[in-house]
Image: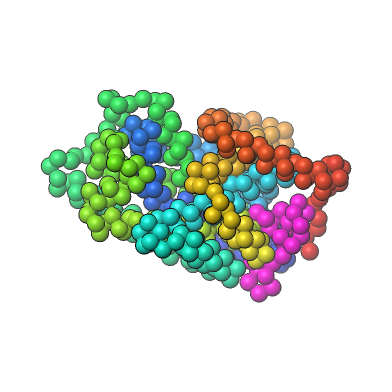
Amino acid sequence: MAENHSENQMDKQGLKRVLKMGDLIAFAIITMVPIAPMGIYGVVAVLSKGHVPLAYVIAACAMIFTAWGYGQFVQRYPEAGSVYAYVRETFGTNVGFVAGWTILLDYILIPALVILVSALWLQALTGVSMMIWAAIFIIAATITNIFGIELTAKASNILFYIEVFVLIAFIATAVYKITTDPALSFTLHPFYNPDSFNFHAVLTGTSIAVLSFLGFDIMTTLAEETIEARKIVSKAVVLVIPIIGIMFVSQTYLGAIIHPGYEFADPDVAFYYIAQEAGGKILQMLCLLGTILAWGIGDTIAAQAGISRVLYSMGRQGHLPRIFSKLHPKYKTPYVSTLIVALITVPLVYLLTLKDLSSLVNFGALTAFALMHIALIYRFVKVERKLSHVIMPFLGFCITGAVWYGLDILAKGVGVIWIVIGIIYLAIITKGFKVKTVLPVD
């Protein structure tokens, strides 16, 4: 009764509860992009020596542990904030701040990353400067998110259907090609080819394939806008991994059949050559435009919505200036945080490369995931005395730690500096960690 009363109070004082399970799943899938492997297929293929679908199967299994952990925390703390809220409630406000500060490095860079990919592709396709395309994507996402989460959910659902259409079109065309071309046949070689299989190579490819799954956790930042959050979000966050995993494995398996091996004229655009082999120019352009639409619009909207709500939560708790927690009087959205995210994205798009952005996003996400697993282990051991539950977060921490260890030196260096800056900032606002920063919600 106390928990329900707390949620009812939150409804009256904060964000508007309108989202359902279907909205959350579509929102998360939009963030991950159903056709995401098309953009990095060549890189994963070269690293895994042609075992792309196997790399995605392993990546999906790894992410299941993290998704399960998120689901456990959502049942206990159905509020906006994601890892920030979970670690804060387990270890206190100061450690929670470090987790929130770390995940900021992930969330706040994702809009710039997806916008840069789309803008560069459109520049190559049309000749129009990527700066113009980037501005269009930023403005469109900002307006959509300020006008309300309902509009954001509707836009995400529409784009979800478009992306699924592109995926289905490729799968149908590829299957037709394989069944009608005598030179092609269904085989298990994409999962295991004895002539080229190397377990270390497959794990290296998996470390890149995992990137396609990052973003599933964004749905937990919308908990305060979800009907029956404890029940709905905890189920949705676990369900989304196998759903998106099937999409990823299906397209990469068919791609590997259409183009066996891992030699390409240009690995960065390998899948667009594969699409042309499968269905000619029409399918190639459909996959290209679908990817641009998914990343530049759908992913930008979802990523911007997620980070704005993390900033909203940190502002509400006093870890950031209270202006971040200001809601729009009519649409009940964190419009100040949304505008700030847009302003931050602009210079990032123009100053950083895709490689830099990708590496830094990985550091923020994987470090935050590791902290979440540690918090869940502590809760099961010290707070709830459920020792039998420890195995899942322990395995999740080990897998996440192994992937984190493989990050490049730039990501680790900048990431550590980012955390140090956050700790210094925390020391200042808490007067040497002596003053609590949690403020009552207005």
Rendered residue at 38%/39% (across/down): 43
**Is residue 196 something that shows in the picture?**
yes
Rendered residue at 43%/35% (across/down): 206
Q: Name the side, left or right, on which 149 lies relative to 256.
A: right
**Is residue 148 something that shows in the picture?**
no
Return the x and y of residue 346 as percentages of the image width and height.
57, 58
Q: Name the side, left or right, on which 163 lies relative to 175.
A: right
Extreme residue toward the left, this view: 182
Q: How is the structure coloured here? A: rainbow
Rendered residue at 67%/70% (across/down): 328
Q: Name the side, left or right, on which 51 lies relative to 230.
A: left
Return the x and y of residue 416 as percentages of the image width and height.
66, 37
Residue 330 higher or lower than 402, as above or below: below
Nearer to us in this view, 218 or 50: 50
* Residue 20 is covered by the magenta coloring: no
Query: In which image quadrant can residue 14 be found?
Result: bottom right
In the rendered structure, which segment of residues is drawn in magenta?
Answer: 310-334
Return the x and y of residue 189 as percentages of the image width and height.
27, 32
